Image (cartoon, rainbow, N blue to C red):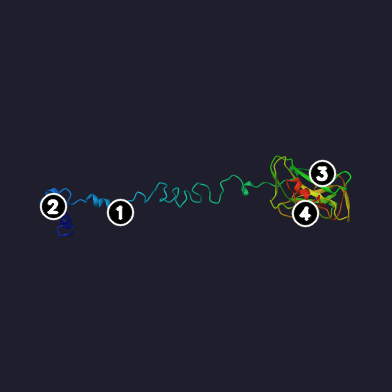
Amino acid sequence: MKSAVCNNRGTSAWPRSWKSCAVGAAAVAAMLASTACEPSETEGAGSTASDRPSATSTTSATGSAEPGAAGSGDSATPGTTGSGTPKGSSGGTGGGSGGTVPACTAEDLSFGTTLEDGKSEVPKHLLITVTNAGDKKCNVYHYPHIFLGDYAEARYPMDVYEDSDPKSGPVSLAPGDEAYAAMLASSVPMDQYETNAITLLLHGRDLGSDGSEPIGVDLPRVVAFDDGARVTYWTTASGYALDFIMSS
C-alpha cells in the first residue's frame, strides 16, 4: 500500500500537494496513514556518508583533515614544522654562523716557552704555551708561524709537522684557557742558528695566511736551531703535541 501511495509521485497527479497524497492513503487504510509516506527506521539506517555531511570529512581527533591543522601533512605555519620550529633548524641555541667565535688577537693572548730537556741534555725540545688573557672566547688557527730571532732578519718560517693537524678545526679558548704547540729545534746538524728568542705570528683562518703582527717570545735559554726544526699544530693537550717531538 505504501508503494501505491509513493508511486503517485511519478504520475500526472504529482503536482498535487503532499497533503492530498496523505489523504488518499488514509482512505485506503487509516491505520497506515501516519507512516505511509515517511521512510521507515530501516531506510534511515541505510543512508550512506554521501547522503549527509560526515563528521570526519573536515576534522578529526587530531584535526588531520583540515590543511594547516596539527597532525596534517601541511604544517601549522608555512616554513615551519608542526612544532613551530623553522625547517632546517635544530631548535638549539648554538652552531651555525650565529655561533661564530672570533679569532684571537695578539692583545688577547700571552705566550710562554718551556724547555723539555734535562739540565745535562742538549736543549732542543720546547713547548710553546698560549693563554687567553682576554675576557672573551676566541680561536687560534692551525699552527704558529715561527721565525728564529728577529722577524726583520728571518729568512723563512719554521716547517710544521703536517701529521700533527688534529683535523678538528680551530682551537677555541675561553678566558684563562691554554693551547700548546711543541717545537723541535734540531734534528739535522746543518746551518745552525743560535738564539734565545723567536718571533711568532698567529695563523689566519685560511691555511698559510697571517693573523697577527709579529710577536716576540723569549726562550728559557740559548738554543741551537737547524734545518730540521719543526713545530706542531695548536692543541689543548700538551702531551699530544710533545709526542711529535720527544722521539727525535
| Label 3, residues with CA under 10 Å away: few <14, some 14-19, many ≥20 | some
Mark 2–mark 1 distance (CA, rounded to whole Å): 29 Å
The earlier-in-sequence mark between 2 and 1 is 2
> Which label number is shown at residue 161?
4
Q: In this rendered view, identify the residue nearer to me: 247 or 161.
A: 247
Q: Say which residue appears at 18% left-offset and 59% top-offset.
A: 10
Q: Are marks 4 and 3 in contact (CB under 8 Å)?
A: no
**Amino acid on which the number 3 mark rests in the picture:** Thr
Mark 3–mark 1 distance (CA, rounded to whole Å): 90 Å
| Label 2, residues with CA under 10 Å away: few <14, some 14-19, many ≥20 | many
SS assignment at label 4: loop
The earlier-in-sequence mark between 2 and 3 is 2
**Side (left or right) of 157 relative to 168:** right
SS assignment at label 1: loop
Mark 2–mark 3 distance (CA, rounded to whole Å): 117 Å
**Amino acid on which the number 1 mark rests in the picture:** Thr
The earlier-in-sequence mark between 4 and 2 is 2
**Side (left or right) of 240 relative to 23:** right
Mark 1–mark 4 distance (CA, rounded to whole Å): 80 Å
The residue to which callout 1 is attached is 48
Q: Position of residue 41 (x, y in %)?
A: 23, 49
Q: Are marks 3 and 1 in contact (CB under 8 Å)?
A: no
> Which label number is shown at residue 132?
none
**Residue 159, quarter of picture:** bottom right
| Label 4, residues with CA under 10 Å away: few <14, some 14-19, many ≥20 | some
Q: Position of residue 181 (x, y in %)?
A: 77, 48
**Amino acid on which the number 4 mark rests in the picture:** Tyr
> Which label number is shown at residue 25?
2
Instruction: Mark yes or no: residue 142 visible.
Output: yes
Q: Are marks 2 and 1 in contact (CB under 8 Å)?
A: no
